[in-house]
Image (cartoon, grey):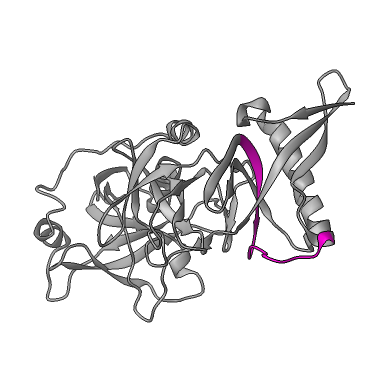
Amino acid sequence: MKTISVHRYSDLKKWQWLRVISTIKKQVKEIAGEDCYVGIGRKYRQDKAYGWQIAARIYLQRKRKRVTAKKRIPPSFHVRLQRNDGGYDTIKIRSDVESAFNQTGRRIALLNATTGYLVRWIDENNFRRWGFITVAHIFDDTQIRSVSIQISNSVRVDCQVRAVSGAQSGIDAAILEIRQQQGGGHPETALHSAGLITNTNPPKISTLTTPQIQSLSLSRSNGCTYPPVRKFNFECENEQFPYGVPLGRRTLQNCIVVRQENADVFKVGTSGSLWTINGFPACMQVGGRPNNYDVGLGQSFHFIAPWIKSALRAISIKLVRAF
């Protein structure tokens, strides 16, 4: 039986990666006594990329510092994989161990949500409506359905939760419809005051497609995140999650990982932030890695968009502002 070392994600097909990852997860369970999820990407040592070959990145709920030799994750995994001719090869891939991503939405008595996406839709009664898109996980385990969003230094907008993605959807998104404001102010007046719109029918903004996002992340393109205070640059990681990323109640699909040199860029309270890649709207932040919160997890907005239209039962909908 031949042993083949895997160096690039393209060395195997997706069904082969699914087989490899499934086997690795079983081995980790036997060794460490706990469940994990697996990404395929660069190996890191002391927060610096270590070698150019990819690794099976093992995400545990808490990265272990000192363990006995018996419970130590091996430096590489060997997985038997069937070939098309019926024979078998042994696939060898390096390993890496990381702390699992955390949800980075913030729940407080009166929810304050972060958002970077403004949408406009025509409902089934032909009424024009406006809303923001943020993460769903801040609404898990709470009955609160009124949200206040700070969209400028002087303007805060009152919203009502219109829809929250379910646990089986593979999506972490919620729609916040802008309602009549305190004092009777119209939603469009608040948006005008904040400088988010200049008329009631702004042009549609296009986002990168999910395949474009995956391609750009594999080539480690640069981008920006726009949390509430200021923007930060980041570099995309060439990490793939064939089985998705378990995060809270949901296993999220079509996610990418990005890295920033400063701590706390992707901290709790920044979920829902807009990410751009090469200047184009691409993802919504859904999580961060708890070590220093210098590594973020984002989900393709292009992947989220069909759920938004379906949840609203909208005749038409368009993204009109990414901020």
Q: Nearer the viewer, residue 27 or 115?
A: 27
Q: Quadrant of residue 243?
A: top right
Residue 68 lies in magenta, yes or no? yes
Horizontally, residue 276 falls left or right of residue 141, namely left
Percent across and percent down for residue 88 are 87, 26
Residue at position x 54%, y 43% in the image: 49
Residue at position x 65%, y 30% in the image: 7
Percent across and percent down for residue 263 are 40, 61
Counting every numbered tag in the picture gives 0
* Quadrant location, the N terminus: top right
Horizontally, residue 232 falls left or right of residue 264, namely left
Task: Look at the picture and state if 91 lies above or below 155.
Answer: above
Which segment did they paint magenta? 53-69
Residue 120 lies in magenta, yes or no? no
State the residue lying farthest toward the top. 85
Residue at position x 69%, y 46% in the image: 95
Residue at position x 45%, y 36% in the image: 220
Percent across and percent down for residue 182 are 16, 75
Percent across and percent down for residue 82 are 84, 28
Task: Look at the picture and state if 203 lies above or below 36.
Answer: above
